[in-house]
Image (spheres, rainbow, N blue to C red):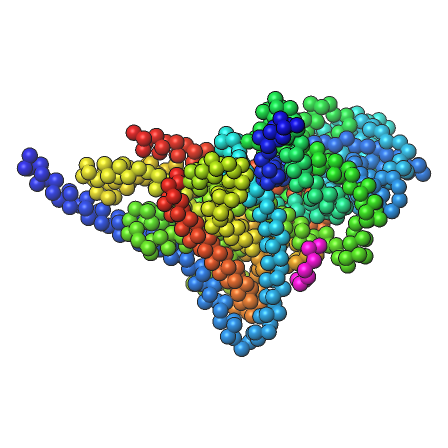
Amino acid sequence: MSRLWARRRAAGEGAGAWLAAGSVALSLLLLGSLLTLLAVRGLGHFWPASVALVELDDGRQLAGWTVRELPLPESEGRERLYFTGNRDRDGDVWEWLPVARIAAQTYPPELVVLERRRWGTFIGRLVAVEPGPETPGWESETAAPGDTAWARLAARLAALERLREARETLERETIRPLVRRLEADPEDTAARRALAAASERVAHLRAAMDETTLVLESVDGRRFRQPLVEVLAATRPNALSPLGKLVAWGRGLWRFLSEGPRAANSAGGVWPAIFGTVLMVLLMSLLVTPFGVLAAFYLNEVAHQGRLTRLVRIAVRNLAGVPSIVYGVFGLGVFVYGIGGTLDDWFFEDRLPSPTFGTGGLLWASLTLALLTLPVVIVATEEGLARIPAHQREGALALGATRLEMLSRVVLPMAVPAMLTGVILAVARAAGEVAPLMLVGVAKLAPQIPVDGDFPFLHLDRKFMHLGYHVYDSAFHGDDVQAAMPLVFATALLLVLVILVLNLTAIFLRHHVRTRHAALSRQ
Amino acid sequence: MIERFSASLPRTRRRHRRDRLASALITAGGLGVILAVLAIGVFLAVEAIPVLFDDGVSLARVEATLTPLAWGTLKAAFWALLFALPLALGAAMHSALFMSPRLRARLKPTLELMEALPGVVIGFVAGLVLAPWVERHLAGAAALLLALPAGALLAGGLWRWLPAGLRRRLPLAWAGLWLLPWLVALGWGAMALAPWLEGLLFGGDLRAWLAAELGLHYAARNALIVGLAMGFAVLPSVYALAEEALAGVPASLAEGAQALGATRWQALWRVVLPAAAPGVFAAVMIGAGRAVGETMIVLLASGNSALMSLSPLEGMRAMAASIAIELPEATPGSPDYRLLLLAALALFAFTFLVNTLAELVRTRLYRRYRRLGGPR
């Protein structure tokens, strides 16, 4: 008994210690579940889900994939939510079915999934590929459905892609320069003739693209015709091997990263948002780096280290804790309405009352975020400067260097990693901020990206898209949030990954700085 | 020799002139940047304060507009801190005094990464994933809230009775990690038991029971959801500062207490924590500042209806969210615009004061540590 008692006393640390340990575990659990949720739902969306052919007890058939299963609210049993697509035929893309009513569920390999520009996804059977009357050699083969029609569809889709590229090249390389030449000199008859010829070729290409139609059949037997030009991608998920699914998954991921949004941001990709985020952050770091470093050098190296400097330092540090929305208000009031309004009055009077710089835009967003992240850069650089051993400075001065030479040849090179750390942290913070951008220039959908071939190439007055705002907007303002959710997850995952990578870089850099400076002061 | 010296004289003068010029430039630039940053407060004050003395906007209107917003802001911050403080302070105590140094060196950057997660992502998950889920599994969520802390305690109780070999394999220093699967298992168990408990205690429907017995109406996007999400966002910054304060306490204090027979927990609770109290207080203040100003989480997870209710199961509308929604539509110079600017000024003043207070307390604390012969 006494031995047992002794063991308990020796081992006991008290309830508090275990609660404290539990809170560490719980924090890690929260973080882990959030990241897992984002990763699974964000990446899982691109995996081609198997399409089930469901037969109900009353003989009705429908095709789609299971989204989730819940217990029925009022009675026993469960119900399943299917994504069935075909908005143009059914008016809706979702269907709740009680599990008890499902008579049979099969996965026939011939079911196709089409992604269309209008009306979203089609799920059903492909009956035939009909070439238009003008294309000889392609005869309608309604009699032979299945694989041949599928092979034809693939060939036609590839041909369509080639036509589309040809048209884009024509428009970019021939038509647009000609239009510019005509704008400069409306009397240029050669250009006019060339333009007419090019337009005719484009019309020809467009006609060739419009020719093919698909004959589709939904699983409950309704047939209809679908112009091929509206189809963006076609898959047969049930016929794919695991490797094929992996390829399809990679292709879906790539299209998400490289294409623009469709269907009110609830489908398609996020390329303009990636571009806008990166461009805005780049501009911001160009602005914030020199000014932040200048202020840090002033505070740490030049200013008299008295009470006033200490107060200023505390104030700057505290500005890092001021809510970002307040910076947004400042940006709106001072940059957009103040400076932007004045610029419009001076230089863009002819365009008033529609504002050029007097409304939110890329420049004002970058400036606002630069102001927001200045404290971050100042604090990080100052920390780096304070870690440089005093004997380095003293050595330089003792050898006859002036202060400028000491700062630029000794202190600055040693402070570079700290500055980089600060800038990376600033970039990571800026990439995730959404609230100030809502006030100073982010757009739900910006048709033109801010960089193009027209002078002055970089359009600082344009609105832009942003990953974080994209998440907010499609999660909060979409018509069918349920349909947009997978893409919102993917976008959120992308944003989080970018920010995590940036932060990890900053953490490694800072570690590197600390070990190096610790080694220096030991010598 | 003399020739070389005289030849270098103008050069030296030039170098010194350049030096003075550069110093002046750095001074001017640095001061300019600092003034620009500090101009935020000035701008807000100049634009917003006149609204209080303006005839066009009555004081009653200012009050009617801002009171629900201030209420919403404080309510959200309160629930956020209620979630974040126990977790953050517990984690800070554990990692400052009990955790193995190797794990601690990994944990700190991990929680730093957690701090960097954008508010819009947290808000989205809270508002569109967590809120509907909790609405469906209200009893399960409540069971989780109770089961997880109880699980940590239970682990401590069971640990004492483990065989010595296993106890050495699962030391308290690594408990932050090996408790994870235990908590996951317990959470799963709590979720599985919840419907049964709900049937037993609340007649099968916790929401109906809440409405009938306590008169609480349950809104899907409510203060508890906001509190959980914002607590998640605030937790890492509170943790970092509190941990720094606790780890900075000179080791001699805790060692002295332990030499006199205190357990490690007693030394922490009676000696280290009182010594570090100002630092912990500063951490709490900074957390409050962040919770008050966080925009995207309240915007996405609070429902944004300007209610003034005490119930944690109803939504609210916070100042920051209100500014983000309404300011782009307000005409510059109009009373609405100025009222929103006044709200921004209030946010700015509150966070700035709170942070300054925290910073002053912290500086004083570290001076005290130095006097006591700590590492700093």
Magenta highlight range? B306-313
Q: How far from the left and from the top, in percent, is residue B318? A: 61, 58
Q: How far from the left and from the top, in percent, is residue B35? A: 38, 57
Q: Is residue A482 left or right of residue A498?
A: right
Q: Is residue A198 left or right of residue B2?
A: right
Q: How far from the left and from the top, in percent, is residue A129? A: 78, 32
- Secondary structure predominantly adopted by residues drawn in magenta: loop
Image position of B244 with respect to A135: above or below:
below
Residue occupying the far bottom of the picture: B55
Query: What residue is shown at x 32% (from left), y 49% (from top)?
Result: A298
Give the quadrant of the C terminus of chain B.
Answer: top left
**B82 in magenta:** no
Q: Is residue B344 left or right of residue A212?
A: left
Q: How far from the left and from the top, in percent, is residue A185? A: 48, 51
**B311 in magenta:** yes
Query: What residue is shown at x 53% (from left), y 65% (from top)?
Result: B342
Query: What residue is shown at x 43% (from left), y 36% (from top)?
Result: A510
Residue A252 location, quadrant: top right
Nearer the observer, B31 or A9: A9
Image position of B29 with respect to B115: above or below:
below
One can see residue B128 in this view: yes
**Count of numbered badges drawn on the protein:** 0
Nearer the observer, A27 or A486: A27
Residue occupying the far right of the picture: A58
One can see residue B117 in this view: no
Query: What residue is shown at x 41% (from left), y 32% (from top)?
Result: A512
Residue A274 location, quadrant: top right
Nearer the observer, B145 or A404: B145
Nearer the observer, A83 or A402: A402
Give the quadrant of the N terminus of chain B.
Answer: top left
Residue occupying the far front of the picture: A2
